[in-house]
Amino acid sequence: MELQPVDGGRVTLNYSITHPAQGAEIQITPREEWVHDFSVSAQTIAFTVDSNADAEPGSEPRQTFFTVSYPEAYDKAVIVRQSAPEEAAALTFELTVHRVTPSQAEVSCIPSDPAATYVLGVMLRSEYEEYASDQALIESDIERFLRPGWTGEPGNIADHLTSGSQIEITEYLYYAERDYYLYAYGLDADGTVTTPLITKELFTTPAKPSIEAGEPEIYPVEGGTFEVTFRIDNPIDGATAEVQPPYNAEWLHSLEISDGKVIFTLDPNTAAEPGDAPRVSYFTISYPEAYNKAVTIRQAAPAL
């Protein structure tokens, strides 16, 4: 007889009797209460198997038997075996680091159980390795979660937990050119840890971008359209440079960026006093996560 499912249900067995006696009937003698409600027809024996949902998940199947008796025949024992609930699969995490800049990381986490609650965080590798074990880090996290806030009210673990089929977040980071861990572990609101180990993914923040620009000359009094070359060291994928015009210097205008050059126009400076010092202004080149670069522009006055 096949193994019965954990949910139980109605079971039907076929049987036959060799050399049946006239007027004789089959008798059923059960052994356990979880196999009951027997009915016998000319060719089948039917009975009910109760649910075994309360058994320890992952335990061995439970087993009993019932006896089929018939006059003048040897008794027949029918063994009934029923599964226990399956042991819950261990909670796992698929961690992905999608994009990293010197100051942030776009990451995602897919848990194996969308209903599970868990902690998702980012930590410097050097700080992570200061903990003696995964358990020590988890205990430190829980202690931090429960620490009273500035109002004096105790902390709440649930405020620090995440759940759902897929979580995508942007983590803001303090240090460029450093190793970080994206990490996750299962945790319930009551502080029960539901994963034996921490899942982690190593990533490294790149160097900060910097802007290098050429040293402009003193531009002629007649004005015109000019260009200043620049370059971005340690560029970020998808980032672009921008140029901001000067304040209170309408004579420097029509700025645009093209292929590593800032193109701009200077109006004539012929109205200046002959022999005056060059007039001065500047424009600013900006780029994500880089310090702005001010480029000084000097235009000559008329000669004496």
Image (cartoon, grey):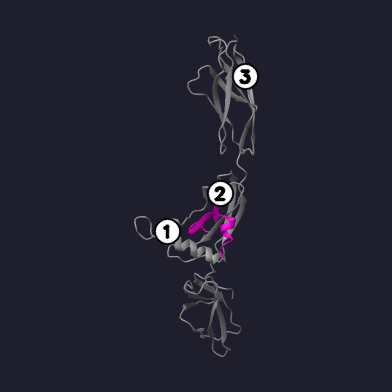
Residues 47 and 140: in front is 140
Q: How far is disc 3 from disc 1 in space, using C-alphas?
A: 64 Å
Q: Quadrant of residue 73?
A: bottom right
Under mark 3, the amino acid is Ile
Q: Residue at x 45, y 81 (%)?
A: 33
Residue 72, compared with residue 250, is above or below; it is: below
Q: How far is disc 2 from disc 3 in space, using C-alphas?
A: 48 Å
Q: Which residue is mark 2?
A: 107
Q: Which residue is mark 1?
A: 158
Under mark 2, the amino acid is Val
Residues 268 and 52: in front is 268
Residue 252 colored in magenta in the image: no
Depth check, mark 2 against mark 3: the one in front is 3
Q: Residue furthest bottom?
A: 72
Name which of mark 2 and mark 3 comes first in the sequence. Answer: 2
Name which of mark 1 and mark 2 comes first in the sequence. Answer: 2
Disc 3 secondary structure class: strand
Q: Is residue 37 left or right of residue 293?
A: left
Q: Residue at x 51, y 55 (%)?
A: 120
Range drawn in magenta = 106-131
Q: Which disc is residue 218 wearing? A: 3
Name which of mark 3 and mark 1 comes first in the sequence. Answer: 1
